[in-house]
Amino acid sequence: MKTPDSSSPYFQPELETLSVEGLRALQSERLQQTVRRCAQVPFYRDKFAELGIRPEDIKSVDDVTKLPFTTKDDLRDHYPFGFASVPLRDCVRLHSSSGTTGNPTVVLHTQSDLDAWAEAVARCLWMVGARPDDVFQNSAGYGMFTAGLGFQYGAERVGMLTVPAAAGNTLRQIKFIRDFGTSVLHAIPSYASRIFEVMNEQGVDPRRDTKLRVLCIGAEPHSEEQRRRIEENLGVKAYNSYGISEMMGPGVAFECQEQNGLHIWEDYFIVEIVDPVTLERVPDGQLGELVLTTLRREAMPLLRYRTRDLTRILPGDCPCGRHHVRLARLQGRSDDMIILKGVNIFPIQIEKILLQFKEIGTDYLITLETREGEGDIMSVDVEVNNVFTDDYATLKRLEHEITRQLRDEILVTPRVRLVPKGTLPVSDEKKAVRVRDLRKLF
């Protein structure tokens, strides 16, 4: 088993290679502190009373199952500051979701919370090989979206020269990458693919004309096929990142250089995988919903937060030497599952098939709608590579083959349409829009 690089304060061997027994003892101590903090929050105080729980009843990490779940709707219902466990004068920053479907979720931070967050991101970046002599460029949005500031402060802790390029303006991103010698880049997967496309259009060879070597990707579900295509195109190693603003943002979990699962920092969180229907824990290795309890949050600790993200715990130890539990690549969200003609479908299944075709790009849009006489139907719009043919007969053959393979995978027959590059929508946060469900309008 390897010993991780110990030449940085952001490799912390006393925590990262702590034994399973040591992690459980640390979690038990921090869980008791967290529960005492939560007892100051009216929502949790009422929940404890309903369940007949007192803070002193929670003595070890095994007692976490006695605690109530928390949901995004709970946070919205207590907007804006109902989950604060400290006075607002002790808080120094807040982040929030967009709130496009009602009240946003608001997350508060003390200075200690921000320091812990920056340390977690720095630990992640060091783990994938980022070093002080690297140049780090961040193409995520800054502001309420946590990926911008989260990666920014973590990269600064590592000691890298940072380029806060923010989202969009791809030509400028490429100019910065070349002029500043960017070697570590953070981008969501769909935008990393877009950067390569524009490089191609501009005659820029990322291997010859840039110093890129490490790419951090996350914020939207993506398949292994998409990751490998990005690596091949940009000439980098792309490491999967997982973050959720209700926990802190980026830095919750990250792949190491083995690329065999995301290490989730168990000194920061208690990890559970539950059946999204029964809410009972599932055995390790079985797919379920990720549930997290914070262990290092002052302003707004959360108990058993239902992330809605679907994953599983990977068995065995990682060759890198870290003992923190590893999560498999996210398979989607429990609330994003598509039910069509009685079949359960996840968008990641469709992406896995699409990215096997070199003739198409990485952007696609699944549309669900109800048509009279046909019931619910699925259409899949797929962008074609600019370099691919515009011959009608060839395009039709490709549509037919994609349709056949999708039918074999998802057990229903979608209507596949090949569309020109750049025609599919993105969200306000520049994430690719993957599913549009028009059935809700009927």
Image (spheres, rainbow, N blue to C red):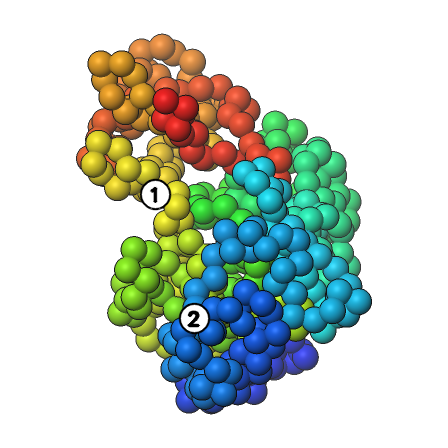
Which residue appears farthest toward the right when viewing the image? 89
The answer to whether residue 317 is left or right of residue 202 is: left
Percent across and percent down for residue 214 are 59, 56
Residue at figure coordinates x 53%, y 78% from the top left: 35
Q: Nearer the viewer, residue 86 or 107?
A: 86
358 in relation to 182, above or below = above
Mark 1, other Cα within 10 Å: few <14 / some 14–19 / many ≥20? some
Q: Which residue is mark 1?
A: 337
Percent across and percent down for residue 372 are 27, 14
Give the mark toward the camera: 1 or 2.
2
Amino acid identity at mark 2: Glu
Q: Whole-Å distance between the Cαs marked 1 and 2? A: 32 Å
The answer to whether residue 154 is left or right of residue 246 is: right
224 in relation to 407, above or below = below
Amino acid identity at mark 1: Met
Percent across and percent down for residue 162 are 76, 56
**Which label sits on residue 50?**
2
Residue at figure coordinates x 28%, y 24% from the top left: 376
| 1 and 2 marks in contact (CB < 8 Å) | no
**Which label sits on residue 426?**
none
Look at the image and tell me in which quarter the C terminus lies: top left
46 in relation to 352, above or below = below
Whichever of callouts 1 and 2 sits on the residue coming sooner in the sequence is 2
| Mark 2 secondary-structure assignment | helix
| Mark 1 secondary-structure assignment | loop
Residue at figure coordinates x 35%, y 17% from the top left: 395
